[in-house]
Amino acid sequence: MSTPSFEELDVIILTEAIPEYGLHAGDMGTIVLVYGDHEAYEVEFIDSAGYTVAVTTVQPSGIRHGREGEVPHMRTLERHHPDFPPTAGRSTT
């Protein structure tokens, strides 16, 4: 079985958690950079307001494409990474 190929701007689904960013298997992200010959991917994760909550490198084995019939759902991010505090990029006025 061949490994699926992913391209920049593909929406992906995590297949394993990334605890340091508070991300769970099943969370959706967008590939923003493909490393080499698809050895790894830089993926951005956003909240429902469009603010970045994580940008991290993932291996091909840690992501998959979405499947027909799947419905995304929302959850509260339990833990914010210090690089992406809850108020990052938001107006405080």
Image (cartoon, rainbow, N blue to C red):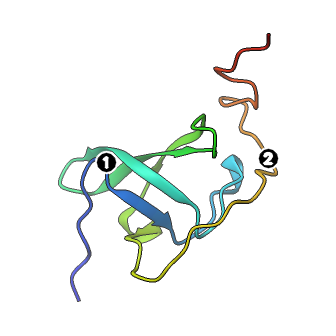
Give the residue drawn at x 50%, y 79%.
70
The image shows residue 49, relative to residue 63, as above or below, that is above
Residue 9: image tag: 1
- x then y, percent, for residue 22: 72, 52
Residue found at the far top of this picture: 93
Nearer the observer, 58 or 9: 9
Residue drawn at the location 67% of the way across and 47% of the way down: 21
Mark 2 nearby-residue class (10 Å; few <14, some 14–19, many ≥20): some
Question: Which amino acid is tagged 1?
Answer: Leu
For marks 2 and 1 on the same chain, the one whose residue lies earlier in the sequence: 1
Residue 82 horizontal side relative to residue 5, left or right = right
Report the label total: 2
For residue 50, side relative to residue 11 (left or right)? right
Residue type indicated by callout 2? Arg
Q: Quadrant of the C terminus?
A: top right
Q: Position of residue 18 (x, y in %)?
A: 63, 57
CB under 8 Å between discs 2 and 1: no
Q: Nearer the viewer, mark 2 or mark 1?
A: 1
Which residue is tagged 2? 79
Quadrant where the N terminus is found in the figure: bottom left
- Residue lying farthest left? 37
* Callout 1: SS: loop
Question: Disc 2 on helix, strand or loop?
Answer: loop
**Label 2 – label 1 distance at C-alpha:** 25 Å
x and y, in percent, of residue 15 in the image: 52, 72
